[in-house]
Image (cartoon, grey):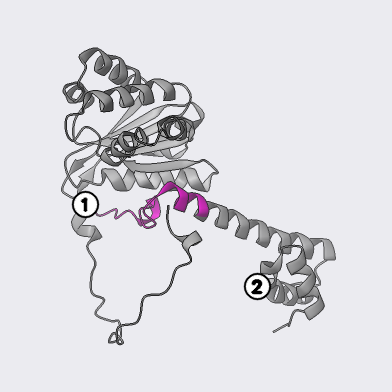
Amino acid sequence: MTIVDHELLTALKRLRLGRVALTLPERLVLAEKQSMPIEQLLLLVLTDEISRREASATDNRVRAAGLHPDMRLESWDKSAKVSFDKRLLATLTSLRFLEEHKHIVVLGSVGVGKTFLASALGHLACKHGYGVRFLRADTMLRTLRQSRLDNSRDAEMIALTTVDLLILDDFALEAMTKEESRDVYQLFLERTGRGSMIITSNRDTAEWLAMFDDVLLAQSAVDRFKNAAYDFVIEGESYRPRLKPKLDASAPEPSLARDKTPVHPRKRRQ
């Protein structure tokens, strides 16, 4: 195996290209075997670095979004006994809805995989450079309620209305207060035509009206949303049992319990 020269490694680190050394030895071996021109070798090395940086940027966006790391399209269990419009899913995975500032409402009974598929679309958006934020609807409403106490509501609402893709999970589970109804109305109003939302719910959009404190606000907010949203309906058995942890019979006997690995505060999920 080719060893990277110390001076070269130092220079790479000064240029913040230290990770190039991870694949440089094997690239040098490949270049020697194939009598590769220096320009082609340089392109190969730089392409490796671009791929690493893009992957790192995607990981950072996923963490900032609050997405579950395992809820990705490639992890979806295709044997799940649920049904949905696969053609529509293919359209949504093109992310054209983000370019057009359209919304998605993911409807279905408890446990059919609404959160999973909404999160998977969020991961895909992160991969393609979009800013994403994933929140449970009740968490968002509680945060906005608390933000009134420290006069940070405007800043919080700006964050909610300006992110490329806002994912609200379990919307309209219970009736909203007057303030919460106004918050949702403002959110729906300000994101219309400006940014996309994915909302998961056990209730059809027609049932959302009864969850608002104010009928007129409800009609205006829901009408704006549903007329700019794709309806993605999932039917079938609960998907959650497929997410249960399972014992791997082929795995070796577990070792003794270990101490928790310290996590640097800056690396903790926000």
Please tell me the numbered disc located at residue 145.
none
Location of residue 31 with respect to 146 vertically, above or below: below
**Left-right relation of 32 to 133:** right
- Which of the 4 quarters of the picture holds residue 152? top left
Looking at the picture, tell me which residue is in the foreground, 224 or 85. Answer: 224
Q: Is residue 54 left or right of residue 196?
A: right
Calculate the distance from the C-alpha at mark 2 to the C-alpha at mark 1.
40 Å
Kind of residue at disc 2: Leu
Residue 177 or residue 253, whichever sits in front: 177
Q: Is residue 68 magenta?
A: yes
**Residue at label 1?**
239
2 or 1: mark nearer the eye: 2
| Image coords of residue 81 (percent x, y) | 19, 49
Q: Give the residue pinned by disc 2.
A: 22
Residue 27 lies within the magenta run = no
Label 1 Cα crowd, 10 Å radius (few <14 / some 14-19 / many 20+): some
Provide the residue span drawn in magenta: 60-80
At horizontal 21% and vertical 54% (from top left) the residue drawn is: 240
